[in-house]
Image: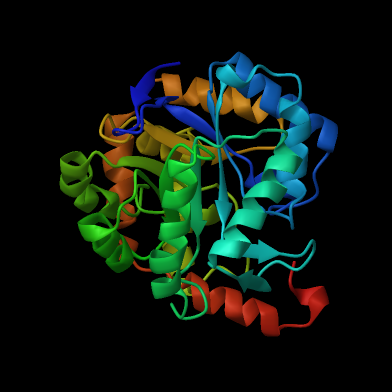
Amino acid sequence: MYYNPLGKTGLTVSRLSFGASALGGVYGQVDEAEGIRAVHTALDLGINYFDVAPAYGGTVAETVLGRALKGIRRDRYYLSTKVGKYTQPGAYGQDILDYSRSRICSSLDESAGRLGTDYFDIIHLHDFEYQHCRHTDWALGEGVAALLELKQAGRIGNVSAGIYPMDLWHRIFESVPIDAALVHNHYTLSDTRAMELLPAAKARGIGIINGSPFGSGLLSGREPADWHPAGEADRRCFRAATEFCESRGVPISKLALQFSSQNPDLPTTLFSSTRSESVRRNVRWHEEPLDQDLLARVRDLLAPVMNKQWDYDAAVERLTTRPPHERE
C-alpha cells in the first residue's frame, strides 16, 4: 500500500481508504462478524483511514465499526465521522438535518461513544445540500464555526464537508475555512469534475478525499438501486459499458476502482465493503496496472453521460413518498 499526504492536514493516508457506509446496511443485509473481519483485513493490508457517519443505517455503521476497532491501537488508523445528517434505522432517506452548534457537539459525543474514541482526525459536515439547499448557509455558518471551535479545543483535528454539488464545492473551495473535502461521485469513469477543484485545493492545502468510485452503483457491474436518478437512456449507456468490459474479461468495477484510485493528484479513494474477500480484491485491483486501451474504449461509450449532474436530493425525496415496502 502506498501513502500520500492529505493536503496540509498533517495526515498521511493510504491510497485506498475504508468507507463504512455498507456496515450500516445501506446496500443490503450485513453479517456483522464478517463486516468486522473486513475492517481487520483492511488494517492488515495497510489501509489506515476509516470514514463513517451516524446517518449510515441510523448509527449501525458507527456501532459496528466501533466494535471492529475495539482493542486496535489508535495510532494505527485515522478516523472520521460526520455531523448534521441523522437517519433512524430502516428509514433511509427520511433524514433530519441539523447544523446547530449544540447538535454538532452532542452528535460528536454520541459518535465518540459508539466508536470508542475521544478524538476524530476529521469531521465532515454531511449532505447539507439536501432538502433543496435550505440548510446550506446554516451549515457553512454556524456549522463550520462550531467545528472550528472543536478543532481549537483539541476535540477534532480537521474540518471538512461531504457533499455532492459542484457549484457548492466551488463556493467552499473559494472561501470556506476547511482542511479537507470528501468529494463523491466526481472522479469516476463517467465524471472527472473533481479535477476542477485541484488548483484551489493545492493553493489552500485542502486535502481531497475521493468518494464513490463505483458511481453510486452505476459502475458496479450491477443495476443501481431503482431510486437512483439516472433515467433509462442513461442506464442503457452504463449497461453498454458494463457489457463491453465483460466481453474483454474485465469487470467494470475493477476498471472503475483502478481509474478512481490511481490518480496521483487525489490522495485517497474511499470504497465500502462488508466482506474481507472484497477488501482483498479491491486492494489487489488497485495495485494492478490500468488497461489504458480498455479505459479509452469505455470512456467513449460513457461519453453521453460524461459529467452529468444527478439530482440525488430529488431522488431521495421521491423515495420517502413511496410506501415503506417499496423503499428497499
Residue at the image position 24 percent from the left and 38 percent from the top: 205
Q: Is residue 286 left or right of residue 293?
A: right
The percent coordinates of residue 126 (x first, y second) are 51, 59
Q: Quadrant of residue 104?
A: bottom right
- 165 shown above or below 263: below
Q: How does the figure colour the protein chain or chains?
A: rainbow
The percent coordinates of residue 310 (x first, y second) are 42, 69
- 204 shown above or below 5: below
The percent coordinates of residue 152 (x first, y second) are 43, 42
Residue at the image position 21 percent from the left and 45 percent from the top: 198
Q: Quadrant of residue 275?
A: top right
- Residue found at the very far front of the displayed protein: 153
Residue at the image position 56 percent from the left and 23 percent from the top: 77
Q: In which quadrant will I find the N terminus?
A: top left
- 201 shown above or below 281: below
- Residue found at the very far bottom of the displayed protein: 321
Residue at the image position 51 percent from the left and 20 percent from the top: 284
- Please tell me which residue lies in front, 71 or 293: 71
Please indicate, yes or no, whether residue 63 appears anywhere in the rendered image. yes
- Please tell me which residue lies in front, 174 or 255: 174
- Please tell me which residue lies in front, 18 or 241: 18
The percent coordinates of residue 37 (x first, y second) are 75, 25
Q: Quadrant of residue 328?
A: bottom right
Please indicate, yes or no, whether residue 276 appears anywhere in the rendered image. no
Q: Is residue 170 left or right of residue 309?
A: left
Number of numbered discs: 0
- Please tell me which residue lies in front, 292 or 41: 41
Q: Is residue 216 left or right of residue 169?
A: right
